[in-house]
Image (cartoon, coloured by chain):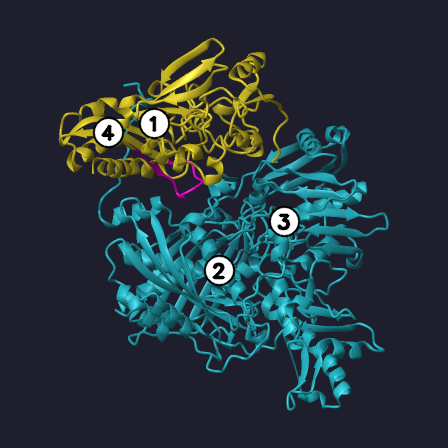
Chain colours: A cyan, B yellow
Amino acid sequence: MSKPKPDYQVIGKPVPLVDAWSKVAGQAVYTDDIKLPGMLVGKILRSPHAHARIRGIDTAKAAALPGVRAIVIGKEATAKFGVLPISKDETAMAIDKAIYIGDNVAGVAADTEAIALEALKLMKVDWEVLPAILKPEDALKPTDDPIHEKTVRGTNIHKEVAQEFGDVGAALKTGKAVATGDFEFIGITHAFTEPMCTVALYEPDGRLTIWSAQQVPHYLHRALADVMEMPMHRIRVIRPFVGGAFGGKSDPFPHEMICALLSRKCGRPVKILFDREEVFLSNHGRHPTKTHMTLAADADGKLTALDLKAQIDGGAWGSFGVVTTYYNGVLSMGPYRFPTFRYQGRRLYTNKAPCGAMRGHGAVNSRFAMEVLVDELAEQLKTDPCDFRLKNLLTSNTTTVNGFRITSNGTKECIEKTRKASEWDKKRGKLPYGRGIGIACGFYISGSAHRIHRSELPQSTVHVKIDMDGGVTVHSMAAEIGQGSDTMLAQCVAEPMGVNLSRVRVYCQNSDMAPVDLGSYSSRVTFMAGNAAMKAGEAIRAKLVRAAAALTGKPEAGFICRDEQLVYALEPSVRVPYMDALTKALAGNGALIAKGVYTDAVIPQQDRKGSAAGLSPSYTFQAYVSEVTVDPDTGFITVDKVWAAHDCGRALNPLAVEGQIIGCIHMGLGQALQESFDYHRGHILNANLLDYRPISSKQMPPVEVFIVESDDPEGPFGAKEAGEGPLLPILPSVANAVYDAVGIRVRQLPMTPDRIFDLIQKQSGKSLRLPPKKPSGLQPAGSQ
Amino acid sequence: MILPEFELHRPRTLKEALAAARKHLDDFDYVSGGTDLLQNYKNRLNCRRHLISLSDLEDKGLREVSATRLGALATLMQIEESAAALSGVRGAAAVVASPLVRQTATLGGNLLVETRCFWFNQSEFWRNAKGGCLKEGREACLVVPQKEICYATYSGDMAGVLVPLGATVHLEGLEGGRDVPLGDFFQHDGIRKNVIRKGEIITHVTLPASAQKLKAGYRKLRIRDTFDYPSMGVGAALRLEKGKLAELHVCVNAVATTPLAFEDLTAACVGKPFGEPEIEALCDEVVARCQPYKNVALSPTYRRAMIGVFLKRLLIDLTA
């Protein structure tokens, strides 16, 4: 931070995303825009039961329907898959039993959607309805018929984690101040714009091509190979433009398998496009979670203990759940220093739509609990919440008690900037009743330090090719999902080469043409693919510099590349235009080709189970201040303004970083204020965007963004993630502001007006006006 | 979700529309904006094989907007933006759904909006999995278990202000035209909904000239400030004379199968001062008569409590 900012040419400049024009002009090709000759419509028969054995499926009538071209059922593809190799528990379709309402039972491909839907009605499933596990507490009990084969101790517990570092019990006993709370978070979902969509084409030569709205094309590639029982080299995965994902497209999905199976069966291309209800049934959103947390601090106002329990409701599949279970604990290890830490986490299988990864994966709910309790501790110790936080921050270049290596860390600057800009010291505790201000911090990973498939293969590889036209093409399978990764790759390649961004085109869609990248999840792409891109750009630069040295007779070491010139720094009048250097470099060689890779960082790891969970080559930090107005008579919360500071190491593209921060606030406010995945006995009650209620544009507060640049030692040009960490502080900063406004402590999300109204009523000792014992009789207008 | 198959009829006159209705009397729906109806069709809710579009009707007055007359085919945005319409009416139009919906949705459609219930407004897959309800032809209501009455919630906003303003609905039907006071238009049954007869079309709504002397308004409870149907709404129209209440009408919306009026309670307030204590007393009596059901967003207890809060705020504003 104290170092002068390097004088970059394209890095750090606010540039519109390279794919923006094609999107706003309506020319970007999304999966649903793909139309192939002879393409069929695929539809999925779904279970109406939360838990039911399949005694038999009669598809004869459906198969006889004119226009039906293929039908597939579960026993035709029995190989298991799942995004985590340690937790493969899915099959393409239910084989013996369906385990949630909406579970995939059969697939049909037909000439039209209407015929496919008619065919679904003609299929008859002989069901034996089984008792459903819907409450997480019921999943704890031993059972003879668990939802999956592999569970803990014959129950429906999917994963258990127990960790302790230092003597938490002793620290709690001797704490001067202790804050504790039971928190409850309802499940939420991503509500991305583009529904899931997949096109599959199995060709007569035994090759499969799949186009799919995906964040992790590589994991889809692996899962398809398993399920289709085909070698990976005969499968090509293409990721067209993706209309939003947020973690909701980061698993290989059953519908992708069904689509491929249908195409193989009838030899024609098949498209499956979900309707919105199917998107909700597929879910993979944030887990409903019960969190118990206790924090302790000593008389000096230093945190001494974090004791945390989380019970997370996983729904029907494993998905990323093992990771989620760890993250609910270990991602609480920053930005504050805890000398002791204990975590007990548990993820449960239930007969509900599967939960998975969602922006801020695993960290959001525990973060909420922590930031609310930190405020309570500060109050007990009669300390300002900002001062209390500042006093307890991890420093740069340190290690947490559970072994995380902290390198760059800009939390202090984040707090100071938002505190000043929001006029915190004039406002906190001093605004009139009904208005309040609150602060919260955040902490997140920049990718996982280790691959989920343990091997020495790189995490990211980027290829660059340049021919005589001077255009630079970048090839990678990093998944552009709207977050700006294509633009980031273009910048990271262009900067070392000293060429204009307009020369660069990014090709990131086709697994035959681009090298493996593990995909867009856990905020890994800027750090990892960005590093690979930078190295590829540097490798090209070396070739150009060699040519410039040959042309000028100057030593290679003296050249800098900038503004499409290779300049000999000691004698700036000696310079070679980029095209001249390129022509020289191509002579006798042909197109310039280079690659860059990012392999796992070497980070000392503790010798214990789960020590890799949450281990990241670098971490990001945030501090947000929110100001709110609470209407005490109705319970409505208006977020008036947010001051948001995020340490992203270096903003490669400040415009994109700002967009991510504002987008995170929008999404986080949804979970904070109103979104919930409502169930009635296993049926989702609000599987549509009207009743699910994402935040509307009218509810969005003005946001003042502060980008803090801590210059990470290992990130590309010093950069870290900016896509997920910025979601974390918004929820608790609003809750802490609500406390400042009306004096209620929130323990449950979302903070809907009825819940806040109820809390205010209870606090003031007034009871709700109770309904009369008998309805007073309805009186239609005019009937009196 | 795709729409079911239907035949679309596009008459140019009311006469043609009625003729089309007579021809397909047992299997048709009228459609104008379609913002409510077509979503229900996508969910396969009470679909008909014939849709008679009213969008092309050229008869005079169907889209007229003035202080005393509102054409049934006037869009809600047209009413919202009309300088001629009463401000209370414009205010209610402005809080229906979202701007995009208001550009298409019509006044007539809002008055006739399908009653809502979270057992009913679901997909075909959902209803089949769950078992279905009275309103879509199954055996019993799932809100109040019995087999006679559907308890789906009336969810139109415009009635919330038009009832207190004393509006009259004008209908054209197979047996000619008739006028019905809006206050008598609705029926306590989420299926029957209102007194409209098969084939009848609302042509327009009129307000008495005296309505122009009233101060009217509408307040809507919803989680988001846009898009959402009302979880509760209150409307009122009143006139003060020399510090005393000369006229008052109140309507509570979206807590029952119909808009609710309280003419006996409001009449009792007339001729007296109408300050905060009187307003609070009236609100308590109104709340005591309302019993929302658990079938739309937000809990019945909360919606009930909000009737008092919203009505008090509205009446204080209107008497200020």
Q: Distance of mark 2 from mark 4, alpha carbons? A: 60 Å
In the image shown, does A617 or B219 lie closer to the viewer? Answer: B219
Residue A441 on the magenta span? no
Q: Earlier in the sequence, mark 1 or mark 4?
A: 1
Q: Quick one: SS at disc 2?
A: strand
Q: Which residue is denoted by mark 4 in the rendering?
A: B238
- Same chain letter for marks 1 and 4: yes
Residue at image point 81% right, 43% down: A267
Q: Quick one: SS at disc 1?
A: loop
What is the three-letter code of the residue carrying label 2?
Gly
In the image shown, does A273 or B274 lie closer to the viewer? Answer: B274
Q: Which label number is shown at residue A345?
A: 2
Residue at image point 68% right, 34% down: A113
In the image shown, does A732 or B261 lie closer to the viewer? Answer: B261
Q: Start and end of the magenta stretch?
A: B217-231
Whether residue B190 is situated above or below residue A471 in the rendered picture: above
Quadrant showing the C terminus of chain A: top left
Residue at mark 1: chain: B
Whether residue A648 is situated above or below residue A359 in the rendered picture: below
Q: Is residue A687 left or right of residue A532?
A: left
Q: Which residue is denoted by mark 3 in the rendering?
A: A26
